[in-house]
Image (cartoon, coloured by chain):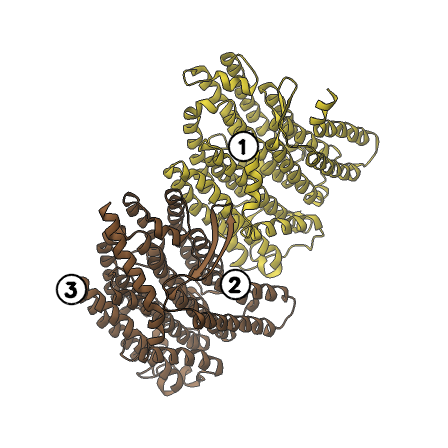
Chain colours: A yellow, B brown
Amino acid sequence: MINNLNILLPEIFLTLSIFSILMIGVFVKNSFNLIFNLSSLIILLTIALILNGSNNVEKIFLESFTRDAFSNFFKILILVASLFVLNSSKNFIIDKKLAKFEYPIIILLSILGMFFMVSSNDIILFYLGLELQSLSLYILASIDRDNLKSSESGIKYFVLSALSSGLLLYGCSLLYGFSGSTNFDLIAGELGKDNTGAVFAMVFILVGLAFKVSAVPFHMWTPDVYEGAPTSITSYFAVVPKVAGLAVLIKFMFIPFSKILMEWQTIIIFISIASMILGAVAAIGQKNIKRLLAYSSIGHIGYALAGVATGVISGYESTIVYISIYVVMNLGAFSCLYLLKKDGEYKENISDLSGISKKHPILALSFLVILFSLAGIPPLGGFFAKFYVFTAVVEQKMYALAIIGLLTTVISAFYYLKIIKTIYFDDSIISFDNTKNKFAQFSIFISCSILLTFFLYPSVLSNVVDTLFLN
Amino acid sequence: MDFPILSTLIFLPLVSSLFIFLSRGQKNNNSAIYISLFSSLATLILSLFVWYSMDYASADFQFLEEQSWINDFIKFKLGIDGISILFIVLTTLITPICIISCINSVKDRVKEFLIAILILETFMIGVFCSLDLVVFYLFFEAGLIPMFLIIGVWGGPRRVYSAFKFFLFTLLGSVLMLVAIIAIYWITGTTDVTQIYEIKIPKEYQNLLWLAFFSSFAVKTPMWPVHTWLPDAHVEAPTAGSVILAAILLKMAGYGFLRFSLPMFPLASEYFTPLIFTLSIIAIIYTSLVALMQDDMKKLIAYSSVAHMGYVTLGIFTFTKQGIEGSIFQMISHGLISAALFLCVGVVYDRLHSRMISTYGGLVNYLPKYSFLFIVFALAGLGLPGTTGFLGEFLVLTGTFQKNYFVAMLATFGVVLGAAYMLWLTKRVIFGVTKNDQIKNLKDVNKSEMIMLGILALLVILFGFYPVPLMETLNVSVDNLINNYETDIKIISLN
């Protein structure tokens, strides 16, 4: 038993630390800084614990919890992304007077929820993890509670997400009813082509998951929540829950639903194409950068799902590569937003970027790299992400999906170019304050250097990802 | 393994652009200009050395470099043959000339401009060196980024529209090529060009794949009817941008036809020859007529580029030795001549800030040296014997006559039209009555302009009279290309 607990060590450590810093927060006054730094430390220590642990497959608690390379990879991705999001947004949080000690604690709680999501091997554990994550996210969306837009986005997210969670739960109960088990492996053994009820269950679960990763047609909340929530929260929303949601989606398709591939494949293909098209077309008219990034993230989820739609391991791997590079790009993009500060106010409109290349050449260059990478232009990292996905898609002879996907990249290139046009071609209007947000600059630097040098050793990432499905 | 000379060639400009980037802090632009000039000259010398030391008698790819790259399945493979070395030398020759030209014409953000040019040079050399489809695609597409910025940041009044049109047209054409490249990987199991030559792509896939590649190359060439981005891009781009665009970027597509379309899809190439012939003839005649009606000098030269590239595609798809050699020669010659013509326009544009033909007239009285050079290039552009322009067109037409009399006749008619618009342009700009008083105060070409235009004029005339060095380099590679093409057709149609 004690040996088994080792497997759960990161989760146990995270839970205990959350409780202890919550206590510190309650009893020490003005403890935001302390709690914030402690949270970063906890994240670092958890990363260390995971790296120190083994990658061997272990299933505990009646095989409801799995620890394997797959879950460890996603946990580390989630932790690293959260670390960057938290630290690069620290100045923003303080400026916006959001510096409450609950802030980092709720983020840690949502991380804990995602840990259980990606490790779950049982629909009950999965659902509990998902709810813990979602509840934290509701609070985070409306954390700027005196701001009308933030509260609105919180409520909107809560109502819609609760609905989707309900559908998901209904799907889970159907799944239990038709397979007689809650365990992923056992369900996989029970499901077959003639099990129509299971197909219904799969559809409901897919709806819930598509909502969490904001894929079309369940994306409606995304632009409003992205715009309404404070930027620091938006960047968290754009990156971390998407990673977890996609991990769970892959897991569902890979284990319990592996035998009804024909049934879900069509749905995923539709969702993928719809997301790519909507992400490309709807973003064109946007004036707010956060709204634009929301639509762009919908499009990116579409590309990532194209990899899942192949239904083979190489496709899942390409999706994981895609989402990892997506994380890098979005962290960079949002870190740029923290530097757009003028007289204590953070600018969010594309027109505010007008001509910043003259006064802030380095910031403009970073934007350029990140935006071209988001558009998927070689030799930047974003191109390789798309390349892996479409290689997998074409391997399965899904030419239509590949061609539609690549044509939408051309459409979406248009709005990325529009931002670059604003930055480089237009006359400069305002110059931003010289912020001392060192960590945001650092994360932009990291993001850009990864994107720029990715072409030298593109296989580093995919070699790691290749090991995830060995078992 | 030997010294990786091709990688050095590719990445030398990139590294020097990094140096310029690091010296941003200085107010003075001189150091940046010296660094870029020095590095581009070094690249030129290195490329000349490669040209000198390669073996023309062998049709194999030389200076091969191989690195495992994307996982285990795609290699970063570089290598050159007699065809690619000419384009590499053209690139390395045009780049220092562009850098010299920007001393006079670029006033704003000079360092950034130089960085963009050098990065672009890296990508252009990369295109001509790559022997792997993915590597080729990488360089081919990457060139869009610096060119987009060059047009958009330093361009004329309608620069935003032109930059977007340029970028989106080219990208749209290229994504289909990417699908085709991935498809080729799954059909043959490799993206290594030399291996694909051996494996031979099955009949049933050839037509679709050829069309996918064609969609990209047709936009880039540019062929009628997808040429419309070119006049816009040329007109709005700064002088150096127009020069690079006309001299090198357009050649990537012609090179792509030779390196990929012809050897990889011989059956499809033959099948689609009528399509190419039709489009080329339309390009030659229609755009020549359009060029006649232009009142903007840059636009006129841009349309003449479309017409000249029409000869190139025509020549490539004759599959005759004369035709293909003529196309390559035409590409090199057009690279020199159109670059020079754009520079000529740039020279007067820097002084009067007008590209309109009506602004000028009677330049010969006040700018004798300039007028002489302009006339040399205009005559070369219309294909006067003794210049490179003549040889290219002549060879292409000889090749075409072997295939199709009617097409050859129409193409010859284009030569006449070419003479018409070029001579008329010369008449209106150089000769005639001086209506504009400002012209009387103009200064003739200065030292740096004289160097750029002089070098180009020398080369145009030298290779016009003595094309042997170019032809010798090409000879074996082109023979090999045609032989392989003919045997492939036999083998595949037997299957």
Q: CA distance from mark 1 to mark 2?
A: 50 Å
Amino acid at pointer 2: Asp
Q: Can you give x and y, in whole percent of width and height, for residue B362 in the image?
A: 34, 83
Q: Can you give x and y, in whole percent of width and height, for residue A357 in the image?
A: 58, 59
Q: Residues within 10 Å of mark 1 (few under 14, many from 20)?
A: many
Q: Residues within 10 Å of mark 3 (few under 14, many from 20)?
A: few
Query: Badge 3 is on which residue?
Result: B405
Q: Is residue A340 visible?
A: no
Instruction: Give me the residue at 59% from left, 20% from top.
Output: A122
B128 and B388: which is toward the camera = B128
Between tags 1 and 2, which lies in front?
Answer: 2
State which quadrant residue B91 falls in.
bottom left
Location of the C terminus of chain A by quadrant is: top right
Query: Badge 2 is on which residue?
Result: B2
In contact (CB < 8 Å): disc 2 and disc 3: no
In contact (CB < 8 Å): disc 1 and disc 2: no
Residue A213: which disc? 1
User: On screen, A83 above or below A437?
Assistant: above
In contact (CB < 8 Å): disc 3 and disc 1: no
